[in-house]
Amino acid sequence: MPLVDDLRAITERAHRELDAVHDYFEHSKLVWRSFRLFVDGGHCVIAENRATGTRIDQDGLVRLAPQYTRNYLATFTFRQCVSVFEVFLSDFLHRLLLHNPWQFARCQMDFEIVLKAGDRDEIISGMILKQLNELKYETLREWFAAMKKAVALGCPGEDDIDTLAEVKAARDILEHNAGVVNETYRRKAGKKARFAVGDHIDIDETYLLASWSLMKKVFSDIAAAAGEKLLGS
């Protein structure tokens, strides 16, 4: 079945990308540990950034390693993981809606989409992409509600959705508000909110790994449920 194959391909790609991002994180930490051993062996380094005028030696770099790992490496990895998750959800939902587009039967049609489309399928795809683009500004719960409307998969569970809502809210604040928590984060994160207004979002390794693992779980759960539902229909 082409639809199931497409959904499987979307899921496998998302797993590969999440794995690659986490590999980057672990390999980068390994480089820092190797550098510490290099310095412990008596080697000296002088690093100069011509753009900023900063000059630092090997001991200074070793002292900065934990800060770099937590404030930049872990945060960057987290943001990339959430981006992979968003692309997965968008692509998966787009494919499901193409399979069951009838819920858009009474939607107002954008004449520009009709003019640019070559056939009926392109019109449907264009309408769905327009809806998904509008959905990007809604809460994560709305994303899963749209997925349930397309095909009732029975997953993810409420607690997983709540946890992912906080994960996405944290990423959005890092992306759009320099990591400073505001009321938007509190609203989006809901009962799973971890920070108060004015706090700075902090991404430690435990939270990063838990978020990464949950995304992997949800990828697998959704794909398995969709395959079972569609093949059984």
Image (cartoon, rainbow, N blue to C red):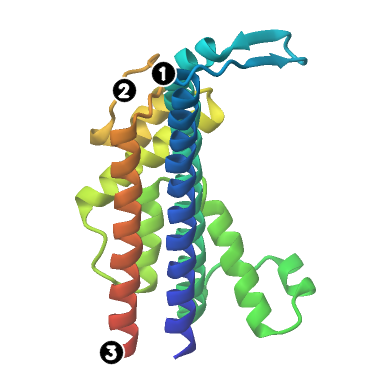
- Residue 103 seen by the camera: no
Residue 76 x %, y %? 51, 35
Mark 1 or 2, nearer chain start: 2
Q: Residue at x 77, y 16 (%)?
A: 51
Q: On the image, which quarter does residue 143 sit in? A: bottom left
Q: Nearer the viewer, mark 1 or mark 3?
A: 1
Asked if labels 2 and 1 touch by Cβ distance under 8 angstroms, the answer is yes
What is the number of the mark on residue 232? 3
Q: Nearer the viewer, residue 56 or 37?
A: 37
Task: Give the Cα distance between marks 2 and 3.
Answer: 44 Å
Residue 194 x %, y %? 28, 27
Mark 3 is surrounded, within 10 Å at the Cα level, by few (under 14), some (14 to 19) or many (20 or more) other residues, namely few
Above/below status of 3 relative to 181: below
Above/below status of 145 relative to 153: above
**Circle 1 sits on which residue?**
200
Q: Residue at x 49, y 37 (%)?
A: 28
The kind of secondary structure element at disc 1 is loop
**Circle 2 sits on which residue?**
195
Mark 1 or 3, nearer chain start: 1
Q: Amino acid at mark 3?
A: Gly
Q: Amino acid at mark 2?
A: Phe
Q: Is residue 48 left or right of residue 95?
A: right
Q: Residue at x 30, y 50 (%)?
A: 213
The kind of secondary structure element at disc 2 is loop
